[in-house]
Every structure is written in C-alpha cells, then in structure tokens.
Amino acid sequence: MERTLISSDSSFEAQIGYSRAVVTGEWVFVSGCTGYDYKSGTISPDPADQTEQCLKNIASALAEAGATLDEVVRVRYIFPDRTDFPKCWDVLHKCLGGARPAATMLVAGLLEEVMKVEIEVTARKGSASAGATAAGGAPPF
C-alpha cells in the first residue's frame, strides 16, 4: 500500500523527523497540531483561538490528503490546564460536531508554555456522515 507524507513546513518536522500527516490507503493520520499560525509564526494566548487555529492546521493537512474534518473518526485533545477544555467546546462542536469522532482528552504538559492545546486526528476518506455540519467538507471557519 502506498504511503504519502504531508508537510506543513513547520521547522519542528525537519528538526524532530516527523510528518504533519501520513496517508495510507483511505486512512489519514494527522500529527498533533498546536495553535501556531504557521504562516505568521504567531500564536494567540486564548485557548479557544488556539483550538480554532489547530483545527485550521488540521483541515489544511486533511485537504492536502484529499479528506475533510467531516471524515475525522478519532481525535485526541491535549491540554496542559484541564480548565481550558470547556472554553474550547464551542469551537470543537462547530468544527467536529458533524463528524462526531471518538474522542479522548488528556492533561499533559506541552513543549512551550504558550501552547494551550494540541490536537491530533485520524480520518478515513469517504467516511463523512450525511449529518455532517461542514457543507461540502469546507472547514466552518
């Protein structure tokens, strides 16, 4: 089975030796993404803003892989501060509420103090449900 590597051009990928996403068959595995805007190199101090940027970064990797947020079947959220998780629920529902993936939330430290959330997903191309909220697979941003 063919294996395709997707990069976001983040310096971390080259330094550490990983890919933003790996595609094999209909499966897309997206590495943990933080709230950095990779184009500007900036990050908001707000957990909900970081969550939205995480999902934009994920949506971009999924699009390059030929998938959408509506096809996410598994998601893992990592928060250094458990009290930030509820602050992000509206954004999570807006972006993943149609897909309703299996989900896990973990509390753990992240690489930099400014990082309030990291999100990783697994998607299966062609698996979007009829009730997905993001029309046509377009990210709801």
Image: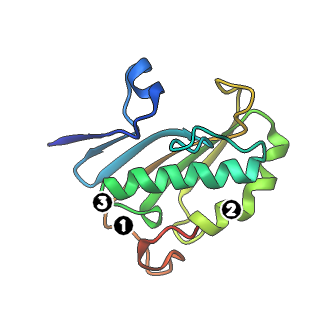
Q: What element carries label 2?
A: helix
- Outermost residue on the left side: it is 1
Q: In this rendering, which labeled residue sits more in front, label 3 or label 1?
A: 3
The three-letter code of the residue at mark 1 reads Ser
Task: Estimate the x, y position of residue 50 in percent, counting from the top left.
Answer: 68, 47
The residue to which callout 1 is attached is 127
* Image-quadrant location for residue 71: bottom left
Nearer to the camera, 9 or 135: 9
Q: Nearer the viewer, residue 114 or 89?
A: 114
Residue lying at 38% horizontally and 27% vertically, measured from the top left: 18
- Taking 115 as reference, is 9 left or right? left
Q: Which of marks 2 and 1 is nearer the N terminus?
A: 2
The local crowd at label 3, few if under 14, some if 14 to 19, many if 20 or more residues have their Cα within 10 Å, is: few
Which is nearer the N-term, disc 2 or disc 3? 3
Residue 75 in percent (x, y) is at 54, 49
Local SS, label 3: loop
Residue 126's quadrant in the figure?
bottom left
Q: Please name whichever residue, 74 or 61, is drawn nearer the observer in this view of the structure.
A: 61
Give the distance between the C-alpha atoms of the residues marked 2 and 1, in whole angstroms: 22 Å
The quarter of the rendered structure image containing the N terminus is top left
Query: What number is the disc on residue 99?
Result: none
From the image, which quarter does the C terminus lie in? bottom right
Q: Name the residue under label 3.
A: 66
Q: Which residue is drawn at 39% across and 44% down?
A: 29
Which amino acid type is marked by label 2?
A: Val
Image-based side of 1 in relation to 106, left or right: left
For the residue pair 73 and 109, the one nearer the viewer reads as 109
Q: Where does label 2 land, which residue?
A: 91
Where residue 55 appears, as percent x and y from the top left, is: 56, 54
> Does residue 67 appear left or right of residue 45 in this picture?
left
